[in-house]
């Protein structure tokens, strides 16, 4: 999912500057009810930032925030293996993006991206902690101004130059070993299409269209050989808990895995079944 650009980059930069001034003016005025959520609330607060941002060489991005999920500690904690998954996903996607654009007959303004975003890794599964305060699907106090509705696995906010992504680069396989989470790779690959199409100036040439950008991101996922749909939080939970085989659907003889009672009663029905963007 990408949000924030409906205008050419020059206009958005001007608008951003104006919005910044307006925000400063607003914040300077005392308000009894507290200010509404602004787009800047989406950015990590100083206390939420990593003391040492992590540089991802093949992403050309700095990881500035990483919140793990208690229920999936090993899969979502900072580790060399997690960082390697992120960086190699970037390496593969960046390597192929020019070929991909050519295959779509799309031109770019620049050979290299002008500027790349900072990155936050946040809980995204709305059946776990994805809706908790400051998580990826915390709309009320963090993302309301930039995300039109629940729920996301990744969110690129062009106007903030920030990429927000789910926090689970790893998953446990049938033997319990930590391996690359193919669904994290899918999410990050999709988001990289949003980042690169914007930063290479594709939309400066053809004009920005949100649906076209979204379609392009999905086509890039397929171009990269990732031929499975985005999943719901319920499906993600089933993958993480080994109820669905990691690579593919359950055999046809088996019924669809039932939702555990604790989850199906606790969760919002739409969040259970909707595919996340
Ligand atoms: Zn998207």
Image (cartoon, helix red, strand yellow):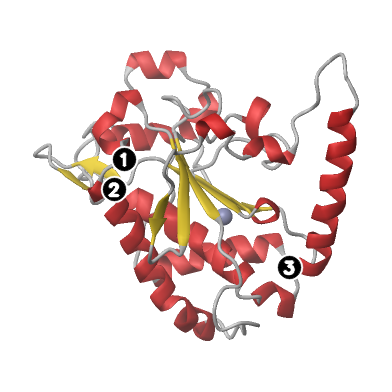
**Mark 2 vs mark 3: which is more N-terminal?**
2
Q: Residues within 10 Å of mark 2 (few under 14, many from 20)?
A: many
Name the residue beneath numbered marker 2. Answer: 82
Q: Secondary structure at mark 2?
A: helix
Q: Secondary structure at mark 1?
A: loop
In the picture provided, is 249 more to the left or to the right than 142?
left
Image point 23% across, 33% down: which residue? 243
Instruction: Inspect this view and state whether residue 135 appears.
Output: no
Q: Secondary structure at mark 3?
A: loop
Name the residue beneath numbered marker 1. Answer: 78
In the picture provided, is 21 more to the left or to the right than 209?
right
Q: Nearer the viewer, residue 27 or 125?
A: 27
Asked whether mark 1 and ligand 1 are closer than 8 Å, the reply comes as no
- For the residues labelled 1 and 2, say whether their Cβ atoms are less than 8 Å apart: yes
**Mark 1 vs mark 3: which is more N-terminal?**
1
Distance in Å between CA atoms under marks 1 and 3: 35 Å
Image point 80% across, 68% down: which residue? 10
Foreground mark, 1 or 3, reads 1
Q: Which mark is residue 208?
A: 3
Q: Nearer the viewer, residue 128 or 56?
A: 56
Question: Residue 194, relative to residue 171: is it above or below?
Answer: below
- For the residues labelled 2 and 3, say whether their Cβ atoms are less than 8 Å apart: no
Ligand 1 visible in quadrant: bottom right
Residue 168 percent across, percent down from the top left: 35, 41
Residue 142 percent across, percent down from the top left: 64, 31
Distance in Å between CA atoms under marks 2 and 3: 33 Å
Question: Residue 97, relative to residue 237: is it above or below?
Answer: below
Image point 49% across, 68% down: which residue? 219
Asked whether mark 3 and ligand 1 are closer than 8 Å, the reply comes as no
Distance in Å between CA atoms under marks 1 and 2: 6 Å
């Amino acid at each position: 999912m990408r949000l924030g650009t409906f205008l050419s980059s020059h206009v958005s930069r001007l608008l951003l500057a104006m919005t910044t001034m307006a925000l400063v003016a607003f914040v300077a005025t005392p308000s009894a009810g507290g200010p509404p959520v602004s787009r800047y609330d989406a950015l990590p607060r100083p206390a939420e930032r990593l003391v040492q941002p992590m540089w991802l060489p093949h992403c050309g991005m700095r990881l500035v925030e990483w919140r793990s999920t208690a229920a999936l500690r090993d899969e979502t904690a900072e580790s060399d293996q997690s960082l390697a998954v992120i960086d190699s996903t970037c390496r593969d996607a960046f390597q192929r993006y020019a070929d991909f654009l050519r295959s779509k007959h799309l031109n770019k303004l620049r050979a290299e991206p002008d500027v790349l975003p900072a990155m936050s890794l946040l809980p995204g599964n709305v059946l776990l902690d994805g809706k908790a305060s400051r998580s990826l699907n915390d709309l009320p106090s963090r993302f309301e101004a930039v995300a039109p509705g629940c729920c996301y696995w990744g969110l690129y906010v062009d106007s903030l130059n920030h990429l927000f992504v789910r926090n689970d680069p790893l998953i446990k396989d049938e033997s319990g070993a930590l391996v690359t989470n193919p669904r994290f790779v899918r999410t990050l690959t999709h988001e990289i299409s949003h980042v690169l199409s914007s930063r290479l100036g594709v939309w400066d040439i053809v004009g920005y269209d949100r649906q076209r950008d979204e379609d392009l991101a999905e086509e890039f996922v397929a171009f990269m050989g990732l031929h499975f749909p985005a999943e719901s939080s319920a499906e993600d939970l089933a993958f993480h808990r080994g109820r669905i085989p990691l690579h593919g659907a359950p055999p046809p003889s088996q019924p669809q895995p039932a939702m555990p009672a604790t989850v199906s009663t606790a969760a919002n029905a739409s969040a259970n079944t909707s595919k996340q963007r």
